[in-house]
Image: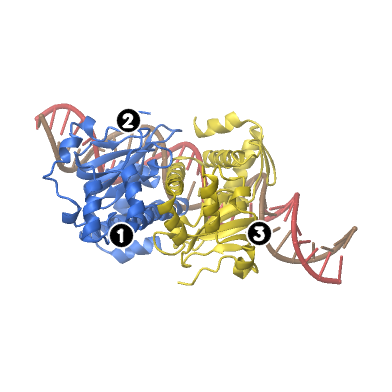
Chain colours: A yellow, B blue, C red, D brown
DNA sequence: CGATGCCTTGAGACTGATCAAATGTAGTGG
DNA sequence: CCACTACATTTGATCAGTCTCAAGGCATCG
């Protein structure tokens, strides 16, 4: 088991990143969804001290890799990530999840002491490094933090159940519709338009995420465009008829 | 949101079940996988007091239902459960997971304050009811408990990732092979034979769990029997060639 | 012994995978 | 700025795996 190297190999310097010119949690507008939700000013300051570094990860850079020793969880401050795993059977890389600002990465590493997937930046990102041992200790001191941490882990489980349900029951078009709705819903919670989005990932990445081939994904996009539900121009997607899209998921 | 009623509606009496004649955690041989893993004698006693009831749930009984208010997590002491959800699209019930002794149920309820699936006993079971608020408080006092709780949540996430991977990449036969290997591995950890098992669930339940129809499940069983990998007699399964089964998952 | 639910097996339909080719886009270096 | 390359996307034709529908066999339980 190799030690975690964060994004160092990508040419970034983790330590420098924690320099004092970095803005802390108080300046971050992600309170509403991140770990320090509903904190008092005082607790926020304590939590702020817990964050080891604000680590920039360039597009294509790696945050952690499967098998590395687990030491920290990561809060995504800005940017966009994918987590991937190589399937033991076909040796192909599958996308486990896509992650955006305010979300926590690396939680699945706590159980076995090592990360079980790779985390790759799909655009230039800024990540808050939260050493797990310190987080654990602070959870014992700040009840709000403990509660919020448990909620986040629990929601992760519930979301995975949703995805499993989608994969076991839904046809290609329904999967893609649900994927787009999920994505826009999360983006909307961050202030983006619910009707327009720019995909950060390729058709192939969407495909492995949904259990489809890239050709099928492309065809579904085309079909939804023909039906007047979407406007598709490469990765620029406009949702013209959100109700229709929703209807594909709940017929 | 209705209040949780545990298995009361099935004709059981939750409160009686907590009578003093019930054996505590000290007598339970599931330490090795349950919450109080590696506890000192003293901590074990404290944790024991936290368990509100040892609740019997008869076969077919309900432990909790989707939408009920979340109040407790449940440790399965003996027996076998399935958790299910009704897919919003096709209105059909899908099996989210199967659960056996030593496993925790209800974790996905923490995030939103209500359970997000139904939990049904597939055989007569005994369940330890652990009120979440008290668990939270005790996690702040017993570091070992906190760590173990986080590990269990984290493993749940990692296991779900495994399943998602299986559903996105694998063909029917591979899914069934992986399912059987997973089941026997978990049973083996509890002292059962790795070569023989009695399925607690129907072909249809396996099917919805794996994203297949019951006919496909049945055909896969037959094919694996013809290939000399399994011996199948209704729900009695003998694994004749474990390597071959493993080979289907890692070709 | 009949009834019920569970399981097996077969035939045909359909979805999505695979293979193949053309087009589009971005990045590179002359 | 353009030619060139690598990669991403679209679209078509064919094929395989799984679903659906249907029928019959097999256990269990009253």
For marks 3 and 1, give the CA distance. 48 Å
Q: Which residue is mark 2?
A: B3
Specify the subunit that label 3 lies on.
Answer: A
In percent of width and height, residue B181 lies at 31, 58
Q: Is residue A107 left or right of residue B8?
A: right
Residue at the image position 16 percent from the left and 55 percent from the top: B27
Q: Is the C-beta separation of discs 3 and 1 under 8 Å?
A: no
Q: Which residue is mark 1?
A: B227
- Same subunit under labels 1 and 2? yes
For marks 1 and 2, give the CA distance. 51 Å
Label 3: which secondary element: loop
Which class describes the residues within 10 Å of circle 2: few (<14), some (14-19), or many (20+)? few
Please report whichever mark, 1 or 2, sits nearer to the chain's N-terminal start.
Answer: 2
Q: Is residue A234 left or right of residue A45?
A: right
Q: Is residue C16 left or right of residue A161?
A: right
Residue at the image position 55 percent from the left and 42 percent from the top: A32
Q: Determine which of the numbered discs, if any, sits on residue A59 in the image.
A: 3
Which class describes the residues within 10 Å of circle 3: few (<14), some (14-19), or many (20+)? some
- Vertical placement of A34 versus A18: above or below? above
In percent of width and height, residue B142 lies at 32, 56
Which quarter of the rendered picture does the C terminus of chain B lie within?
Answer: bottom left
């Amino acid at each position: 088991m190799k030690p975690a190297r964060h994004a160092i190999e990508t040419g970034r310097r983790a330590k420098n990143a924690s320099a004092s010119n970095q803005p802390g949690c108080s300046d971050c507008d992600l309170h509403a969804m991140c770990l320090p939700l509903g904190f008092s000013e005082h607790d926020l300051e304590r939590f702020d001290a817990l964050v080891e570094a604000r680590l920039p990860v360039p597009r294509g850079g790696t945050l952690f890799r499967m098998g590395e020793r687990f030491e920290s969880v990561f809060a995504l401050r800005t940017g966009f990530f994918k987590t991937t795993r190589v399937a033991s059977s076909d040796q192909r890389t599958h996308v486990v999840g896509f992650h955006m600002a305010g979300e926590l990465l690396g939680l699945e590493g706590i159980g076995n002491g090592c990360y079980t997937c790779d985390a790759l930046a799909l655009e230039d990102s800024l990540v808050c490094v939260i050493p797990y041992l310190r987080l654990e200790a602070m959870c014992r001191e700040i009840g709000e933090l403990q509660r919020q941490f448990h909620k986040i882990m629990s929601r992760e489980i519930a979301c995975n159940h949703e995805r499993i349900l989608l994969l076991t029951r839904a046809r290609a078009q329904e999967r893609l519709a649900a994927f787009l709705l999920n994505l826009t819903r999360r983006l909307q919670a961050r202030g983006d338009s619910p009707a327009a989005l720019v995909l950060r990932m390729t058709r192939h990445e969407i495909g492995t995420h949904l259990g489809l081939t890239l050709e099928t994904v492309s065809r579904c996009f085309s079909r939804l465009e023909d039906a007047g539900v979407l406007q598709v121009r490469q990765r620029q997607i406009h949702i013209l008829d959100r109700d229709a899209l929703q209807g594909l998921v709940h017929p």
